[in-house]
Amino acid sequence: MSISLPQPLLTFVEDYRHSHAFKSRSQVIERALELLREQALEEAYALAAEEVDLDWEVTVADGMTNEAW
């Protein structure tokens, strides 16, 4: 795989590689993509948390526990 980057980003990748002891540009790009994926997952979990069903919350709070079954 091959990618093209504008010069300012390529300079950033090189500077980051040297200052963080990465062996290659690919490792820097890989780390950046991992962080981007983590951010996307955090956003997805935050959106899912907003979709909490209030009726379910009332049902869960009725005092029943797994031990009662």
Image: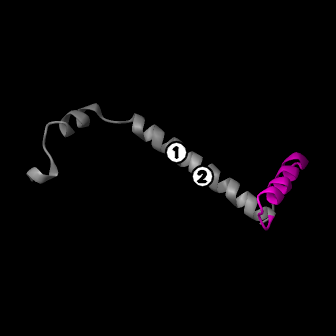
Q: How many marks?
A: 2
Residue closest to the far right: 7
- Left or right position of 56 against 14: left
> Along the polypeptide, which appears first: circle 1 or circle 2?
2
- Residue 32: in sight, yes or no? yes
How busy is the neighbourhood of tag 2: few (under 14 within 10 Å), some, or many (20 plus)? few
Residue at 76 percent of width and 58 percent of height: 20
- Dividing the picture into quadrants, the one containing residue 24 is bottom right
Q: Which residue is mark 2?
A: 37
The figure's colour scheme reads one colour
Q: The magenta stretch spans which residues?
A: 5-24
Residue at 15 percent of width and 52 percent of height: 66
How busy is the neighbourhood of tag 1: few (under 14 within 10 Å), some, or many (20 plus)? few
**In the image, residue 47 above or below residue 4:** above
Proximity of marks 1 and 2: CB atoms separated by less than 8 Å: no
Estimate the x, y position of residue 27 in percent, counting from the top left.
74, 63
The answer to if 15 sits in the magenta stretch is yes
- Looking at the image, which is closer to me, 18 or 66? 18
**In the image, residue 66 above or below residue 49:** below
Estimate the x, y position of residue 52 in percent, counting from the top left.
34, 36
- Residue 5: in sight, yes or no? no
